[in-house]
Image (tube, grey):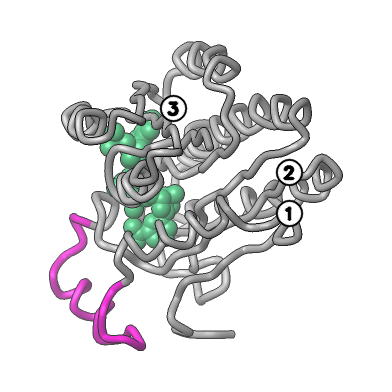
Amino acid sequence: VVILITGGASGLGESITRKLAADPANTVHFTYHRSAEAAEEITSAFPNTKAWQVDFGDAAGIAQFISSIPGMDPDVLVNNALTGYVQNHFHKLEPAVFVSSFATNVMPAVQITQAVIRLFRKKKSGRIITILTSYLVNTPPIGLSEYVANKAYLLSLSKSWAVENAAFKITSNCVSPSIMLTGLTGDMDDRLKELAVQSHPLRQLLPTEEVAGSVHFLVHASSHINGINLIINAAENVI
Ligand SMILES: NC(=O)c1ccc[n+]([C@@H]2O[C@H](COP(=O)([O-])OP(=O)(O)OC[C@H]3O[C@@H](n4cnc5c(N)ncnc54)[C@H](OP(=O)(O)O)[C@@H]3O)[C@@H](O)[C@H]2O)c1
């Protein structure tokens, strides 16, 4: 199986890359932005991986990367990369923040998924897996409105991808994890981390490896599992 994962050298993406690359029958292409060193460690540990440097803030770089996708001929796409978020109350966010976040977090996933679906339809097979957030179903945290809204947009797209391409044996599913310790949450202060652990039903935050296991499941799942959003939140705050 040939897999393409965005943001696959660090954070959750690194766990997914390593999990999928552990199977020598797979070839894993992954993008990275700043984590050049980590990308090199992965490619030397796993000869069945290839790293591509892409900045989702650079339109020309994205276009160039997309032109390489037919050569990779992927069977699976994992939309994982996130360029970050500005944490603030909705009413305090500059309108430009919404536009730039949409441009760097949603549009690259749109463009890469379009390129991949065109290939998948020719092959009459394919798997699209998009990483969202459990905040979509739980009470959204204060200060993350644009982040959660962009994830809701991707959830909606993922369902359309599923419906439009089911007859081509292409599936599109999402994985929505609760908080994990990665670069994204690294600068959270220790008090907030401790609060997150205490309010977690298992008194332990979700390890990235667990989420990688779910992605692995969806890579190999049948075409009957399509259009779902797998929420991994240990029943925290179920509504
Ligand atoms: N951490 C959590 O609590 C949590 C919870 C729910 C969902 N998620 C989701 O999980 C996914 C992975 O996030 P994470 O927690 O692993 O965060 P992270 O450690 O910040 O990783 C983000 C990934 O995106 C890549 N990236 C950042 N800026 C980029 C740019 N300008 N162009 C291209 N790629 C860029 C990074 O690559 P480099 O390192 O190479 O720069 C990195 O691999 C995201 O979709 C996030 O929304 C995270």
Q: Earlier in the sequence, mark 2 or mark 3?
A: 3
Task: Answer with left or right where residue 227 lies relative to residue 167.
Answer: left
Q: Mark 1 or 2 closer to N-term?
A: 2
Tag 1 near tag 2, CB within 8 Å = yes
Q: Amino acid under label 3?
A: Phe
- Left or right of 227? Residue 193 is left
For residue 192, above or below residue 180: below
For discs 3 and 1, the disc positioned in front in the rendered view: 1
Tell me if label 2 and label 3 are in contact, CB under 8 Å.
no
Is 196 contained in the magenta span? yes
From the Cβ of disc 1, is ligand 1 less than 8 Å away? no
Would residue 62 be found to the left or right of residue 199 on screen? right
Q: Is mark 3 within 8 Å of ligand 1?
A: yes
Q: Which residue is the site of mark 1?
A: 223
- Nearer the observer: mark 2 or 3; the answer is 2
Cα gap from disc 1 to disc 2, whole angstroms: 7 Å
Residue 144 picture location, percent across and down: 43, 59
Q: Residue at x 29, y 51 (%)?
A: 184
Question: Between 184 and 201, which is closer to the camera in this rendering?
Answer: 201
